[in-house]
Amino acid sequence: AKIPDSPAPANARPRDSRRRYLRDSATFSLAILVLIWLVATRYLPFTPLPQGVSAASLSGWAYLATTWLGHYGLLAQLLWLPLG
C-alpha cells in the first residue's frame, strides 16, 4: 500500500521557488529589453557617430548596432537588478 505524503508545513516554500523567481524575472527583463529597443529605434537617427566614421560605412553601422544594443541592454539589466 502506498503511504500518502505528509503535508508540507505552512511556512515551507518549494525547493525551486528561488530558481523559478529568477527565471521569471529574467524573462520579464528580456520583455522589457525588447520594449526598450523598440522605443530606442526612434533615437537612432540622432545618435552621434565618432569623428571620421560615416553612417553609410560598415564600421558606422557596426558602431550604431553595438552601442544601441549595449547601452539599452545595460539599461534593462539595471532595471532588473532590484528584482534579482
Image (spheres, rainbow, N blue to C red):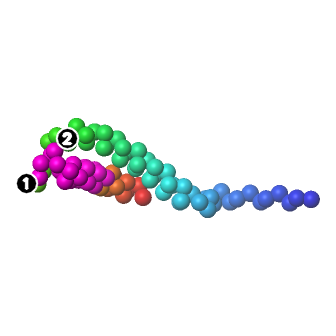
Residue 72 part of the magenta segment? yes
Residue 11 forms part of the magenta stretch:
no
**In the rendered structure, which amino acid carries the disc numbered 1?**
Gly
Task: Please report the residue visible at 41 percent of the width from the left and 44 percent of the height from the top.
Answer: 31
Q: Position of residue 58 (x, y in %)?
A: 20, 50
Task: Answer few, some or many: residues within 10 Å of disc 1's Cα (few below 14, many 20 plus, some between 14 and 19).
Answer: few
Across and down, in percent, residue 37 comes to 30, 43
Q: Nearer the viewer, mark 1 or mark 2?
A: 1
Who comes first in sequence, dot 1 or dot 2? 2
Provide residue 74's location: percent of width, then percent of height: 30, 55
Is 60 displayed left or right of 35 in the figure?
left
Q: Nearer the viewer, residue 54 or 50?
A: 54
Q: Quadrant of the C terminus?
A: bottom left
Eyeballing the image, is 37 above or below 15? above
Q: Which residues are magenta?
A: 51-73
Position of 68 with respect to 54 (left or right) is: right
Q: Residue at x 31, y 43 (%)?
A: 36
Q: Work out which residue is located at the far right of the displayed protein and give it.
A: 1
Given residues 51 and 35, the one toward you in this image is: 51
Q: Report which residue position mark 2 lands on.
A: 43
3D distance between C-alphas at marks 1 and 2: 21 Å
SS majority, magenta: helix
Q: Which residue is mark 1?
A: 52
| Residue type, numbered disc 2 | Tyr
User: Which residue is drawn at the image coordinates 34% and 55% (left, top)?
Assistant: 77
Does residue 9 appear in this view?
A: yes
| Picture quadrant of residue 12 | bottom right
Q: Secondary structure at mark 2?
A: helix
Crowding around mark 2 (Cα neighbors within 10 Å: few <14, some 14 to 19, many 20+) is few
58 or 11, which is in the foreground?
58
Q: Farthest residue in the left direction?
A: 51
Which residue is located at x 53 percent, y 59 percent?
18
